[in-house]
Image (tube, grey):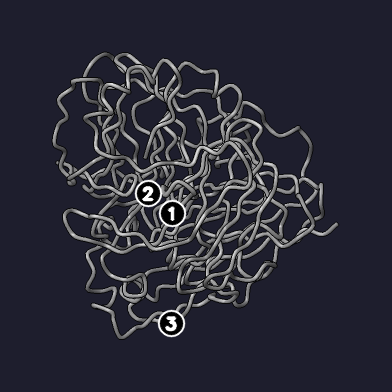
Amino acid sequence: MTPILNRRSFLAATAALAAAPALPRFASAQSAPLTLRAATRTLDIDGRAATVFGLVNGTGGTGLILEPGQRFSVALTNALNEDTLIHWHGQIPPNLQDGVPGMPAPLLKPGEARSYDFAAKPGTHWMHSHVPLQEMALLAAPLIVRTAADAKADRQEVVMLLHDFSFKTPEEVMAQITGGAAMGGMAMGHTGTPDTGKTDGAMSGMKMAGTDSTMSGMAMDLNDYDFDAYLTNDRTLSDPEVVPVEAKGRIRLRIINGSAATVYWIDTGAAAARLIAVDGHDIEPVKGRRFGLAMGQRLDIEVDLPGDGAFPILALREGARDQTGLILATPGATVPRLAAVADTASPAFDTDLAQESALRALAPLSAKPATNTQMLMLAGGMQPYLWTINGQTWDTHQPIPAKSGERVEIMFHNMSMMGHPMHLHGHSFQVVDTGTGRFAGALRDTVFVPPRAVVTVALDAGEAARWMLHCHHMPHLATGMMTELVVKA
């Protein structure tokens, strides 16, 4: 995807652009309303054509960039041949515009259009279908809202949207993952029942890439499906995006994990890096060269290039050797060929919550006691493939009650051997405990809860409405791992 250039970076980039391949374009909007179409696209995946979904902007590219102070004013058209609805992940719109089928807005029918208008929340965010099988078919795109500080900063911005991809249909993928079992929790138009006649085999016959990792002597299920490809901005490492950059330049990487079921380590290689924001919220900078990223989460990483050359930025699949990424290249640099498979497997992500525990919000919530505390037990397993919150799927879920304005604390207690990225709509929350004592952690909308771990978050209940709370691992969501925060006035 085209990077966002400031004036200094533009001078270095223009010379290299002539030799660079054509890049997809963002709509860097200057006037309202913007347009988006949910439509089909054709990608070249390692020389093989693939038809996927996508969100196409007014320039024919994918994604939206809003400039400082610009409202989110968008006309969305459904150009698919099936119903859909888009969720603005990380934004806090009026509940009617949140994009969850039936909560309360209905799905968009083919050919139907709908307008959205609300104050945009700054940061690195994204937008995706809230029909799980459609999200698995890549119906997603970046949504970047820049600040005045971003516009003034002497640095280049580069967006990375990560996806896992299968040449099989999402229905076939789900049938294989679940062993052909019926999926629960699919009410409110989230998706239909998969065609189990297309399954290639039950769970027992699958290669489980992460099951050799252990925690306290028990095997963790890091990955429950091996996808055919792992993408960065719709491309694999056989033909990666090469982004023109300035020698010794500073880059802000805006990284979005839009994958259905894959956690990554982001590796900046030779470039010194600082993690400066998570889920669109600034944090006290954390130095490093490798940071983890679960599904639905975003990382903003600032890197300083050491000089001339080509600098791969890689996303390494947790518990496996697969990798994807892009390459930052200064003018005239020799761009290396990178393999899609690393020499060694990457470890499990944040099983001890060390990364999450190290993050501190720059603008934490005000200090006040919680008047509403809730514990959510996250459970489930591979055989049968079923995932629950407090022992229930969506079909029988128990809503979490809250009153508008009250301080709420939610303790996520993961009883399973898979990690769960838990996402709450309509709110930002602060991580306040990871099992070793209270602290003013990062503000987020999606928190990763590792196997057998406990994470507590605090929030101030917002608009009186029904707000979805769910695991952002799509097969877990599709089999019922979701509930709702019901806020009353």
Instruction: Give the mark, 2 or 3, whose residue is nearer the N terminus.
Output: 3
Task: State how far apart marks 1 and 2 are (Cα).
Answer: 9 Å
User: Image quadrant for the C terminus?
Assistant: bottom right
Instruction: Give the mark, 1 or 2, whose residue is nearer the N terminus.
Output: 2
Percent x, y for residue 340? 18, 46
Percent x, y for residue 3? 39, 32
Q: Nearer the viewer, residue 274 or 386?
A: 274
Which picture quadrant has residue 324? top left
Mark 3 element type = loop
Mark 2 element type = loop
Which picture quadrant has residue 254? top left
Q: Amino acid at mark 1?
A: Gly
Q: Is residue 24 left or right of residue 460?
A: left
Q: Is residue 423 left or right of residue 104?
A: left
Residue hosting label 3: 182
Q: Please report the residue visible at 59 percent of the width from the left and 34 percent of the height from the top.
A: 441
Above or below, 264 relative to 268? below
Q: Amino acid at mark 3?
A: Ala
Above or below, 44 relative to 323? below
Q: Amino acid at mark 2?
A: Val
Task: State how far apart marks 1 and 3 are (Cα).
Answer: 22 Å
Q: Please report the residue visible at 25 percent of the width from the left and 57 percent of the height from the top.
A: 209
Q: Is residue 36 left or right of residue 465?
A: left
Percent x, y for residue 261? 38, 57
Residue hosting label 2: 263
Percent x, y for residue 272? 34, 20
Q: Could you classify mark 1 by the number of other residues whose Cα lies within 10 Å: few (under 14), some (14-19), or many (20 or more)?
A: many
- The circle on residue 419 is 1
Cβ atoms at labels 1 and 2 below 8 Å apart: yes
Mark 1 element type = loop
Q: Is residue 215 left or right of residue 365?
A: left
